[in-house]
Amino acid sequence: MTSSRTVNPHLLHTLFRADDIDRRVRELAENIRNDISERPLTVLVVLKGAFVFAADLVRVLGVPLKIEFICVSSYGTATVSSHQTEILLEPKDLSGRFVLVVDDICDTGYTMQCVKKRALELGADSVKTCTLLDKPSRREVDCAVDYAGFVIPDVFVAGYGIDCAGEHRELPDIYVVET
Ligand code: IMP
Ligand code: MG
């Protein structure tokens, strides 16, 4: 048995290695920490893609917080957004909370726009948005990302929680995927 890991051949090349991601997550955490002051923070994690990023981010934030999850279907197994968002899971109540929405990627912006609106409807005092990856060239709706890890071009990626047709979430690095 070999100890080296076999990466699926349709993964093209590494875009960000785990140590680059780790460094950037720590920088994002510092920026967020400086902006929070004493406000009661809820991190609202967008499932499934943000689960690895959010787990790393909350552990280096170093402030008391609550975690909630929201699941919005937009992609299914395809690599092109349907532009239709449906909320499959959401928190009961966010009243009085300063909400930080954490997603893996902001692409067309529909998901982030939908989650931000829903967080306010659920009573959030204010909402900020954070994505590990931002593809501004793909944006179709006006959706500001307050904290973005890396700005990337129009490529399809997987790894570090991000999937391609449900696969590759477990990979520690982020890869560009052939589509
Ligand atoms: P948006 O609603 O078009 O902004 O899509 C955002 C969601 O699409 C993200 O939360 C991701 O789950 C998914 N997504 C966008 N780009 C990619 C990609 O390159 N790889 C995998 N998922 C992606
Ligand atoms: Mg997603």
Image: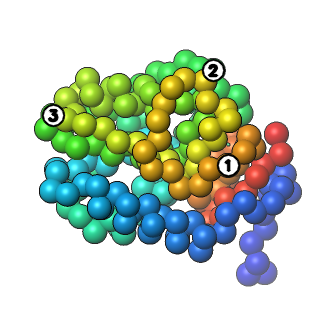
Please state, as top left, top right, bottom left or bottom right, where the C terminus lies in the image.
Answer: top right
Mark closest to the chain's N terminus, 2 or 1: 2
On the question of residue 72 being in view, the answer is: no
Q: Is residue 80 left or right of residue 89?
A: right
Is 71 in front, or is 100? 100
CA gap between label 2 and label 1 equals 21 Å
| Secondary structure state at the residue bearing disc 1 | loop
User: Residue shown at 62%/38% (left/top)?
Assistant: 136
Mark sitting on residue 14? none
Mark closest to the chain's N terminus, 3 or 2: 2
User: Residue shown at 67%/63% (left/top)?
Assistant: 16
Residue 87 sits in quarter: top left
Disc 3 packing (10 Å; few <14; some 14–19; many ≥20):
some
> Given the image, on which type of amino acid does mark 3 rest?
Ser
Q: Is residue 108 left or right of residue 146?
A: right
Mark closest to the chain's N terminus, 1 or 3: 3
In the image, residue 138 above or below residue 38: above
CA gap between label 1 and label 3 equals 34 Å
Label 2 within 8 A of ligand 1 by Cβ? no
In the image, residue 110 above or below residue 172: above
CA gap between label 3 and label 2 equals 31 Å
Task: Kindly report which numbered mark, 3 or 2, lies closer to the viewer in this rendering.
Answer: 3
> Given the image, on which type of amino acid does mark 1 rest?
Ile
User: Residue shown at 45%/67% (left/top)?
Assistant: 27
* Residue identified by numbered label 3: 95
Is 52 in front, or is 57? 57
> Given the image, on which type of amino acid does mark 2 rest?
Ser
User: Residue shown at 50%/22% (left/top)?
Assistant: 85
* Residue identified by numbered label 2: 82
* Residue identified by numbered label 1: 152
Disc 1 packing (10 Å; few <14; some 14–19; many ≥20):
some
